[in-house]
Image (spheres, grey):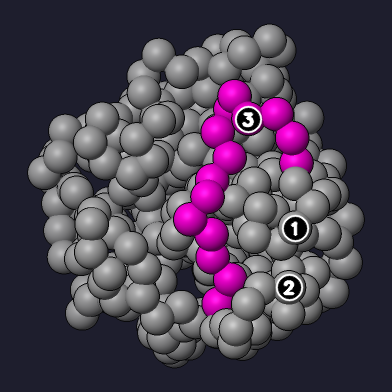
Amino acid sequence: MRAFHDPRSATHDPDTYFRRGAIVAHPEQASRYAILRDAIAARHDLSAPAEHGEAPILAVHDAGYIRFLSEAWDRRAELPGSVDEILSGHFARPHMSRRPEGLLGLVGYYTADTSTPIRAGTWDAVRAGAQVAVSAADAALAERRAYALCRPPGHHAYADSAGGFCFLNNSAVAAQRLRETHARVAILDIDVHHGNGTQGIFYTCGDILTVSIHADPADYFPYYAGYADEIGAGDGTGFNRNLPLAHGSGDAPWLAALAEALDGIARFAPGALVVPLGLDASEDDPIGALRVTTDGFARAAEAIAAARLPTVIVQEGGYLCEALPRNLSAFLDAFDAAAG
């Protein structure tokens, strides 16, 4: 399959972040891009994305939020001292009533945590990732399948906020692009973390089905969403499904949940499919909570390919470990082989 990528994805390169009471090395480093790209270069056709502008981004994201992301680094002089990254320790809560004007307040208004610092190259990187997602969606329509090497990941980004390493929701951008052609589109998120941003964007939408298979969020990121009783609202009632798994679940329960998800997608009868591919479900992932093997990823790819839908695979999580490139290659190779 064709694999879309953009070297500008590496211009966002955070060093550390605050996790569970400690400052630790940031797992979503720029080196992920090169590792994932090199893993697929030998067996898949690498393509640069076309320039689609910001219209596909604004189709799923709030205009004020996009303005903030694009302008924040250029406003850094508003903060005292010299800064390598822009972060806030003050985050808006639902009962707070107003959007502030100052940069530090806006950071807390538009971000959910300290894992999404804005740095010199952040906007270039996340904008490039969205262009990759759109180009892959277009290719999937024409060629039945494509892979989007989006980095940073995106599925924790809501329409108007960043969080969980994510700034722009590449999977949502791809799904909305496919929706321009097909009356119904499905999203099957297999990242170890719940795709809370994607759920939020489409929660009241009846023509885009969102399904997420992930580790139980009761004591795991994103904590506040991803439970089985979240089924959508309004026109979207019944079109959101979460399949949380016990921590430590391996191939058998994960693949059983996948089969259940695919049955639901078949009943929905979409014209196209987006697969937010999180390789952090791996037994070797440094921040994962499931125990999926490399063979498990290959078997998942075969099952998804058997749906015979135009499919865009969007890279989400999967962090620095020896298994990361192996798992990506296993998934994409098995998908290609099964799709024929």
The residue identified by callout 1 is: 102
Task: Report x, y in % for residue 122.
Answer: 63, 75
Pick whichever of labels 3 and 1 is earlier in the sequence.
Answer: 3
Question: Which residue sits at x=29%, y=34%?
Answer: 217
Mark on residue 164? Answer: none
Q: Give 260 or 122, whichever is nearer the viewer.
A: 122
User: What kind of element bears circle 3?
Assistant: loop
Question: In the rendered image, which quarter is residue 102 located in?
Answer: bottom right
239 left or right, relative to 263? right
Q: In the rendered structure, which amino acid carries the disc numbered 2?
A: Glu
Residue to which mark 3 is pinned = 96
Check disc 3 and give the amino acid type: Met
**Residue 67 in picture, x, y percent from top left:** 82, 59
Which stretch is magenta? 85-99
Residue 45: x percent and y percent?
58, 82
**Residue 307 location in percent, x, y?**
49, 39
The secondary element bearing badge 2 is classed as: helix
Contact, CB < 8 Å: mark 1 with mark 2? Answer: yes
- Residue where numbered disc 2 is placed: 78
- Image height check: is 163 above or below 279? above
10 Å crowding of disc 3: few (<14), some (14-19), many (20+):
few
Residue 298 magenta: no
Q: Taken as a whole, is the magenta stretch helix, strand or loop?
A: loop
